[in-house]
Amino acid sequence: MSSSITDTAPVPATRDDAGRPVKKRKEGANVWLSLLAWVVGILFVLPVVWMVLTSFHSEADAATNPPAVFAPLTLDGYREFFSGGASPWPPLLNSLTASVVSTIIVLLLSLPAAYALSIKPVRKWTDTLFFFLSTKMLPVVAGLLPLYLFAQYVGLLDNIWLLILFYTSMNLPIAVWMMRSFLSEVPVEMLEAAQMDGANLVKTLRSVIAPVVTPGIAATALICFIFSWNELLFARVLTATVAETAPVFLTSFVTSQGLFLAQLCAAAFVVSLPVLVAGFAAQDKLVQGLSLGSVK
């Protein structure tokens, strides 16, 4: 009887030098970490919420100091954005075209390059990867004048295909680095089985590797899309009216008459929607992809 009571008796919690249960202390630390995460998350989201709220205010209420938080809401900022002056649709379509086309080209080029650097490693592949990364170390401003002169010489100023070319070259090194880490997780046995079945390189990439690293491809595509969509300097200098992008269009709200803050916030929210929609749509794949190539 005594042995059964002993067996079912609860095991006392481990205590530290001060006599406090270690488990409770860990739970308290987790609570503080969770609270800190919420505070950091709110700090990141607060500017976006403030931008959206300001976009529903009138220009007079948006320009007050301190800001009028509980001012009446209106859609005047969005009406002015869509029908007040220049149409926003050509810049939005230009940004969408340049971002999507350049992202597709980057994926088509980075997948075989990453395959050669991970699954079929070339000689001194680490030097090759470092060379790819070193191309991102040059300040964009330093190469802006030569690129402008080149575009002027070949007659591609204010051309959307010039932006596609530059966005592809800008995102390709990052995509190769990311895809290389993803492809290194592919089991070698799958590739050996595909070779035994007579699959060539193109079929192996399309039917064997691509389905396995789909989360990594989605994460790489989303990051390249965001970088292309948000790019301003190249588009500002190399385009005028025909190939004007959405970030360049946003700068038109800063005029000699002043800053139209409500219209600018409405325009910034509309321009941010494609990135937000793409992020929410691919959030599961993004999390899987960012953790696929992590160090285990």
Image (cartoon, rainbow, N blue to C red):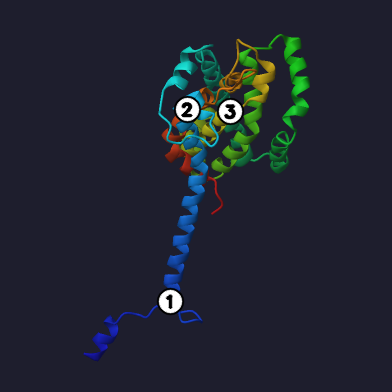
**Alpha-carbon span between mark 3 and mark 1:** 51 Å
The three-letter code of the residue at mark 1 reads: Pro
* Residue 296 in sight: yes
Q: Position of residue 105 (x, y in %)?
A: 57, 24
Residue 230 image-quadrant placement: top right
Q: Is mark 2 on a helix, strand or loop?
A: helix
Task: Report the amino acid beneath label 2.
Answer: Ser
* Disc 2 residue crowd, few under 14, some 14–19, many 20+, Cα 10 Å: many
Q: Mark 2 points at which residue?
A: 55
- In the picture, the quarter occupied by the N terminus is bottom left
Separation of residues labelled 2 and 1 (CA atoms): 52 Å
Q: Residues within 10 Å of mark 3 (few under 14, many from 20)?
A: some
- Give the number of the disc on residue 230: 3
Which residue is denoted by mark 1 in the rendering? Answer: 21
Give the residue displayed 60% in from the left and 13% down from the top.
243
Dot 1 falls on a residue whose secondary structure is loop
Vertical relation: 226 (above or below) 124: above
